[in-house]
Structure formats: C-alpha cells, structure tokens
Amino acid sequence: MDIQRAKEEIKHTVQAYLACDDTGCPLIPPVRQRPILLMGPPGVGKTQIMEQIAQECDIALVAYTITHHTRQSAVGLPFIRERNFGGKTRSVTEYTMSEIIASVYAAMERTGKKNGILFIDEINCVSETLAPTMLQFLQCKTFGNQAVPGGWVIVAAGNPPEYNKSVRDFDLVTLDRVRRIDIEPKLSVWQTYARAHRLHPAVMAYLELRPQHFYKIENDVDGPQFVTARGWEDLSAFLQAADKLDLPVDEGVIGQYLRHPDVARDFAAYWVLYRKYHQDYGVEDILQGKPFDAVLERALNASFDERISLVSLLLAGLNTRFAAARSADAVTDACYQQLRNFKRTLNQADEDAVPADLFAEQCKSYRARLEEGKTSGTMLPAEVATRTRAASLLDRWAGSLDAGLDADDAFDAVRAAFNQQVQRREEAVNTASDALEAAFDFMERAFPDGQEMVVFVNELALGPDSAPFLADNECERFELYSQKLLLHAGEDELLAELQRDDIRAEEHSTDF
C-alpha cells in the first residue's frame, strides 16, 4: 500500500489500542495489541508519518534508529552505585533502565502526555548480538526486564533485504505477533505531503514533468544508483537555502542528494533552465503588474515543459506573498490577544501599580510560555514562528513604554503600536491580492483555456498558503476558473497530457 494508506491504518490502530470501555478496560487487551511492523524501501517517509500521526492523535512520540545500539546499551549497562548497608558504604552493581524505555518516561514528563508511539526504525538491521533483544521487544514489548509503559503503541520499521545487505529475517514466531504493513512509494501521495510542507517549486514542477524519476533504485557494476523521496525533500531544503543565500547549485551538489547519475544530470539541466525562465520572463515584474507584452509571445510559443515551469514560478512568487500575509495576520491576532490581556490587567491592577512594569511582566510571561512550549515540543513549528515574531514585537513595545505614563496613556501607546501592525497586515494582504490579479492577467492572455490554467488554479486551491488566503480574501477570477476548469475538466485530462508530454520528453531528452 502507499504511505498515506499506511498512515490511516496506523492511526486507526492507535485509536483502537488506546480506546477503553465504560469500566476503563482497553477494548483490545494489551496482549492482543500487536506491534506494527512497517516494511518499505528507504526514504519513503516512514518517520514523517509517525510525526503526523502523533500530532493528529495528540500523543507523544519517541523515535529511535536502533542500528547503533548493542545488546548492552539496549538492556542497560551495569551501573556502580554507592549504597549504605549496616552503617557502611558499599559499592553495588545495578542495571539501569533501558535508554529507550527511559526516553519514553522522559517524553511523558516533558509533554505531559501519558499515551504515545514508540517508533523503532531499521529494526531488522541490528547487530547479531542485539537480534534476540529486538525479537523479545516485538514479542513481549520489553527490553530486558523493563516493559514499555501502558498506553504506548509500538511501531517498528525496516527495509526489505533487496535494499540493505545488513537486514535479518524475522522468524515465523515473531511475524505471528506483529501487524506487518508493506509500503510502496507513490508520487501522487508524496506530492500532497510535499505541497503541505512547501517543498521547493522547482522540485515540484520537475516531478510533474518527470514522474518516472520520483523514486528509482537500481544496481549495476558501480553499485547502487538511487533517488528517493527523502533525497528530493533534502535537496529541496538545500535549494531553498541556496536561493536565500545566493549559493551556487550544480550537478555535483545535486548528485549528492540524487544518487542516480541520469536523474541528477537531468534535474541539474532543468534547474539551470528553471532559474533562466525566472529571469527571462521577469516573473516579479509580472506579479507587480508591469507590462508583459515583451514575454507574452515567447510564452505562447514555448514548449509544454517551459510553460509548466513558468506557471510554477508564478505560483512560487504568489505563495511567498500569501505566506507573508498569513504570517502578518497570525502575528496580529497574537498581539491582539496580548492587548486585550493588558487592558484586563490594568482594570484589575492596584492604583500604585506602574503600567509599564505590568506590560513588561506580561511580555516576559508570554516569552516564558513560548520557551516552555518549544522545550516540551508541544507547539507546531508554525505556532512557534508566530509566537516568536509576536514576542519580538511585544518586547519592542514594552521597551518603548514610558514608565511615567498612567494606565490610559500606557494602553493608548500600546494600542498605537498595535495599529501599526494592523496596517502592516493590511499592506501584506493587499500586496498578495494585487499580485494574484496580475498573475491572472498574464494567465488569461497566455493560457486562457489550456492545461496550464488548470494547473495554476488547482495549485491555488490546494496550496497550504494559497487556499487559506483565498478562503479569507475573495478573488472573483479564482472562483470563476475553479468552477469552469476544475469541476468540469477533471484531473484525468491533465494527467493524460502530462503523460503524453513525458513520452515526448523521453524522446527528446537532449532538450535539457
């Protein structure tokens, strides 16, 4: 099955294992709660779905790659402790709790969550001395004499032997005590994940055009040649950093992530063209509403690959603006809550209280809660980013607040600073809306009824930044094309066109 189906299976299993009847007894007795064994090729996304499941089920997660452990480190090395017996101090040997079990209790204490997932990766690649311990772990849910706490679901993952020479086969006794799920890579499922995690648009556009290059593992005389979902995601992260830092990216760098020479060479050529398209078409000029007649003819006569790349570049520019608008909106909302709290505090404060000190203390408390959330891991990255930006604003406002102001004047000063943030939010929204209208101006002139418009509108509807922005800010042309293209054209026609172009591209691969 694909990774998304596996995620749903595991999520349902977690819900079933943690459910209890009206007397508090588990619906499935612990002895019948089989650990889950995920088997699939490397880099397919097994660890990522564990993180998603833990977040969606609001439970903790402890993830371990087991290959570096020995039997001693898993069970617990002897620990010398001094104890007092009969009035004399003696050295005694004790076995410590397993590091892995201890990390479960640490996660419970850090997050305040009693339930969780214990995820053990590469479980079938352990050393020979550790293999019996791992079998015991899967069969009995224990390390040595230390049991996995109740309320924790065990998920293990491994690679099939064709991908790793170090794997060990599980015996029938072990396999009869686990739920085995076999995973295969699937581009369409990964694209949903990649879109939600804002992977680099060049990667997304390339795989739309070359879906056959998404996942490849081959062996020849020079050894394994491969490209995996993990490779694309890690390459995307580097490309995003390279864009911000203006770092060079060539085939050598790309080949460090895409370990298949043909795919690395092909993407490197596409990367050069992708960057060139951005400059040649003046994408930023288009989004700023400047005249585009000079590049319109080229767009009309361009190859399908080039047109799709241009659409991707327009979407990338729009998404940057959508993200900025959403960030400004979230920060403004966070600051508004603190403005309300300040008003409430002033109303309840003693007459001799100093308003500036009260606001400074409130800002200090806000940052302390932020740091606590970051340490415990209970905040999602987006929330951390919002609160960090809000905390910086609040600290700046607190630092500029005159200690001699009375309650009314102090509140007015903070409200005036907040109003400036409201103005910044409105400017960010207007900038994004204007760019969207400008993009539609170009798309209507260049590709009014083509598959390019279908891709453009579809990505706007699905994007993690564009979809919420469009839900809050009306765009008549988006609604018009959504109904005209997406509801009636369907995706089958688009996919057929892409597949036809893939065949043409394979025949003329020297175009890159």
Image: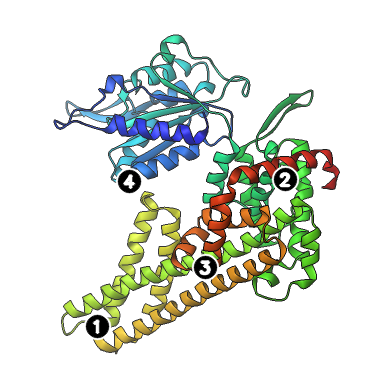
- Image coordinates for residue 360, horizontal then vertical, percent: 32, 75
* Image depth: mark 2 or mark 1 in front: 2
Q: Which mark is residue 354?
A: 1
Q: Is residue 131 above or below residue 358?
A: above
Mark 4 Cα within 10 Å, few/some/many (few <14, many 20+)?
some
Which residue type does callout 2 highlight? Answer: Ile
CA gap, disc 2 to disc 1? Answer: 58 Å
Task: Please report whichever mark, 2 or 1, sits nearer to the chain's N-terminal start.
Answer: 2
Can I make out residue 257 in this image? no
Along the viewing direction, whichever of 125 and 18 lies nearer the viewer: 18
Task: Please report whichever mark, 4 or 1, sits nearer to the chain's N-terminal start.
Answer: 4
Query: Mark 4 = which residue?
Result: 110
- Image coordinates for residue 15, horizontal then vertical, percent: 31, 34
Which residue type does callout 4 highlight? Answer: Arg
Q: Which mark is residue 254?
A: 2
Q: Is residue 58 left or right of residue 486?
A: left
Which residue type does callout 1 highlight? Answer: Val
Task: Please report whichever mark, 1 or 3, sits nearer to the chain's N-terminal start.
Answer: 1
Q: Is residue 159 left or right of residue 113?
A: right
Task: Please report whichever mark, 4 or 3, sits nearer to the chain's N-terminal start.
Answer: 4
Query: Mark 3 = which residue?
Result: 475
* Image depth: mark 3 or mark 2 in front: 3
Q: Secondary structure at mark 1?
A: loop
Q: Secondary structure at mark 3?
A: loop
Task: Please report whichever mark, 4 or 2, sits nearer to the chain's N-terminal start.
Answer: 4
CA gap, disc 4 to disc 1? Answer: 36 Å
Give me the residue at 50% from left, 68% from top: 325
Which image quadrant for residue 353? bottom left
Asked if the residue under mark 2 is in contact with the one under mark 4, i.e. CB atoms within 8 Å, the reply is no
CA gap, disc 3 to disc 2? Answer: 38 Å
* Image depth: mark 1 or mark 3 in front: 3
